[in-house]
Image (cartoon, helix red, strand yellow):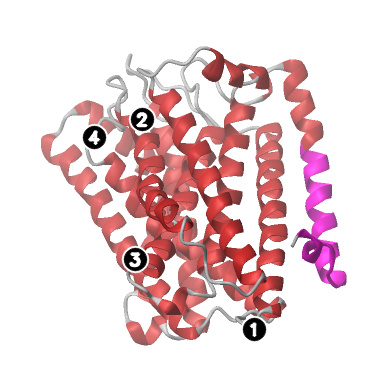
């Protein structure tokens, strides 16, 4: 089926070449990091996790979000997702590859990755994070490719895949839960020391990931003439809206707990993020942009009459993605380190090499996604299910 990825018009090949060019430019900065070490990044002793781990955390949620299509389609026979579920499964593959890419670059020297395998430590959350991420990647490759191969041969989905589908539903929840455990198990970081962090991670994943998928599906509808179906679009938009409402509610619970209890360790980080603390506040502008985007996206998505209009749905989804990315892909990690346990403030900002390496990883994920979706859409069109 891969031969379908080798056929395309000028726009398709221009997109492929652009992604390869971005990957090539980013690889120059990665070689610089390999030679000079992590000193080329903005990280320090006090802020030892930065932009890489923040993007890793966000993309784990994007990978887990495939369950929002898999669960209703396979468990509740929601046929409206028949054209979109394969796109969700393949997006999960690309998202996990992006996650693994950010882990590799954050390690400094990539060979250190093998220490997790050569010296397994089951008492470490990092060990289990490696297990669940690679396991989820393998599950989606097997499920997505096996079902698509059956469709290509005009056969029903193989029965032996169903147990793997059910396992992948539980596994999707587990990958982001384990990621949350990496944070909330650190007693010296009060911003992360909350039992609701895993629930916050999942709620943000179940709105941001499907929002990205829906925007990409609408782009594919226009560019590749592959219609996911109006009912599927509106059903997924409704799911996204409720997930975002829950995500905002959970965030407000954290704000209430911090300021009503008035425990300094909990209030200092939120004060730093939204008002600045002791003259430091590089993220204040970003966090208020996040708040405005969150409010505006709910204004556009909650009323059904707005949500059903494409000219309002798309801006609402873009605002939602921006709000969740700033909160989770920027403020969460940096906020957890500032101030540090000694109540001193060391600010952090990603450097140009960090940003370019991150762009390289995202371009790699987009390349994988483009190829997989090209194959999937080609099969769907040939079999008459597009």
Q: Quadrant of residue 378?
A: bottom right
* Residue ID for mark 3: 75
Res. 297 image quadrant: bottom left
Residue 154 x, y percent position in the rendering: 63, 75
Which quadrant holds the C terminus?
A: bottom right
Q: Are marks 3 and 4 in contact (CB under 8 Å)?
A: no
Q: In screen coordinates, is 169 left or right of 15?
A: left
Query: Residue 49 at x, y = what percent?
Result: 50, 26
Q: CA separation, marks 1 and 2?
A: 46 Å
Magenta region, residue range: 2-26
Q: Residue at x 41, y 47 (%)?
A: 327
**Which numbered disc covers residue 384?**
1
Q: Earlier in the sequence, mark 2 or mark 3?
A: 3
Q: Which mark is residue 194?
A: 4
Alpha-carbon span between mark 3 and mark 1: 24 Å
Q: Pinpoint residue 342: horizontal percent, then vertical percent.
A: 33, 14
User: Badge 2 is on which residue?
Assistant: 183
Sequence-wise, which precedes: disc 1 or disc 2? 2
Q: Residue 5 lies in magenta, yes or no?
A: yes
Instruction: Please report whichever mark, 3 or 4, sits nearer to the chain's N-terminal start.
Output: 3
Disc number placed over residue 103 in the picture, else none: none
Please indicate whether residue 271 sits to the left or right of residue 59 in the image: left
Q: Tag 1, which secondary structure?
A: loop
In what element is the residue under mark 2?
helix
């Amino acid at each position: 089926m891969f031969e379908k990825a080798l056929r395309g018009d000028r726009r398709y090949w221009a997109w492929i070449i652009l992604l390869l060019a971005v990957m090539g430019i980013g690889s120059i900065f990665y070689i610089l990091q390999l030679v000079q070490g992590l000193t080329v990044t903005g990280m320090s002793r006090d802020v030892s996790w930065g932009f890489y781990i923040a993007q890793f955390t966000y993309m784990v949620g994007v990978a887990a979000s495939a369950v929002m299509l898999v669960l209703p389609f396979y468990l509740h026979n929601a046929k409206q997702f028949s054209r979109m579920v394969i796109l969700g499964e393949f997006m999960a593959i690309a998202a996990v590859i992006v996650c693994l890419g950010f882990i590799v670059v954050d390690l400094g020297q990539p060979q250190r990755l093998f220490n997790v395998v050569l010296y397994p430590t089951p008492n470490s959350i990092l060990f289990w994070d490696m297990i669940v991420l690679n396991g989820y990647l393998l599950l989606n490759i097997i499920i997505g490719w096996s079902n698509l191969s059956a469709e290509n041969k005009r056969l029903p989905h193989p029965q032996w895949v169903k147990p793997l589908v059910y396992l992948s539903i539980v596994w999707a929840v587990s990958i982001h839960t384990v990621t949350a455990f990496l944070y909330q198990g650190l007693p010296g970081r009060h911003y992360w020391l909350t039992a609701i962090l895993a629930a916050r991670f999942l709620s943000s994943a179940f709105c941001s990931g499907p929002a990205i998928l829906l925007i990409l599906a609408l782009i594919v509808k226009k560019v590749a003439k592959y219609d996911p179906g109006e009912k599927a679009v509106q059903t997924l938009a409704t799911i996204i809206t409720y997930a975002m409402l829950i995500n905002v509610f959970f965030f407000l619970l954290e704000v209430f707990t911090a300021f009503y209890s008035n425990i300094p360790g909990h209030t200092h980080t939120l004060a730093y993020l939204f008002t600045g603390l002791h003259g430091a506040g590089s993220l204040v502008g970003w966090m208020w942009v996040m708040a405005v985007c969150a409010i505006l996206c709910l204004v556009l998505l909650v009323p059904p009459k707005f949500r059903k209009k494409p000219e309002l749905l798309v801006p609402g989804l873009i605002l939602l993605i921006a709000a969740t990315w700033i909160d989770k892909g920027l403020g969460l990690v940096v906020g957890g380190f500032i101030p540090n346990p000694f109540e001193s403030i060391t600010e952090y900002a990603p450097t140009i090499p960090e940003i370019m390496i991150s762009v390289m990883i995202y371009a790699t994920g987009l390349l994988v996604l483009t190829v997989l979706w090209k194959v999937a859409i080609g099969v769907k069109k040939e079999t008459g299910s597009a």
